Amino acid sequence: MNKRELTRDVMDLLARLRARTPSTEEQELLAVAINAMLFITSTGQRYAFADFLQYLDSNAPPPVVAAFKTREEAETWLNHQPEPPDSTLVLIADQYHSVLYNRELNHRRLLALPVMEYHLGRLKREGLPPATASFKTREEAEAWFMNQTEPPEQSLLTISGDDYLAVCHRNVNHRALYPFSIALDEEEQGENDAQAP
């Protein structure tokens, strides 16, 4: 199904559900969902939405809208946005950050989040695939990875016996290596929170 048919079919389904729903509150919620689909199509976000649906079906790390080498570069970018993309993710020195924006106060902020750490933890918990390649040094691995013409979104590498995830963020033309030593496990965190007094 192409992108145009997908959004049209979703809006048709939502409209049929809304017409059959007796609850005023649920009708209003369905109207919001229909309007969200209209927003996607009327703002030219149909392909971005289709890419996001593909991400949801994949095992890839969350997408980002920009990548920066330094926080200063990211802050400059953020301050030059007429209306920053609130709640979206960016990379600063390969660390995920959320863009926070309050329109009324024109308050802008970048908040570091352990997104990749939890992604690596989930991959470890589910079982790692075989390594795509093995290297003695990180420099060798980076040189190999940067010279790949069409790398997958993510692949496992070993460097000096340690596991790394090679991630290609195609939409921002950025590649990064993440050591599994930084992995965090959300399930363990949830259990620890539940046991806390």
Image (cartoon, helix red, strand yellow):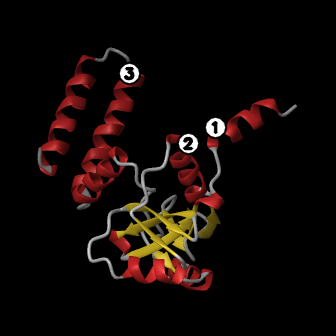
Rendered residue at 37%/17% (across/down): 23
Image vertical order of residue 157 relative to residue 76, above or below? above
Which residue: 58% across, 80% down?
A: 75
Q: Residue 187 carries which label?
A: 1
Q: Are marks 2 and 1 in contact (CB under 8 Å)?
A: yes
Q: Which comes before the other along the chain, label 2 or label 3?
A: 3
What secondary structure is found at the residue carrying circle 2?
helix
Q: Is residue 112 left or right of residue 86?
A: right
- Give the label, 2 or 3, closer to the camera: 2
Mark 2 vs mark 1: in front: 2
Q: Work out how far the residue at label 2 is from the one at label 1, CA to CA, in angstroms.
A: 9 Å
- Image coordinates of residue 166 in percent, x first then y, are 45, 67
Q: In which quarter of the image is the C terminus?
A: top right
Residue 110 in the image, given as x and y percentages of width and height: 61, 69
Q: Residue at x 50, y 41 (%)?
A: 126
Q: Nearer the viewer, residue 116 or 25?
A: 116
Pointer 2: what residue?
A: 125
Q: Which amino acid does label 2 sit on?
A: Arg
- At label 1, the amino acid type is Glu
Picture coordinates of residue 180, whole percent (x, y)? 59, 59
Q: Earlier in the sequence, mark 2 or mark 1?
A: 2
**7 or 68: nearer the eye?**
68
Task: Read off the residue under disc 3.
Answer: 24
Viewer can see residue 60? yes
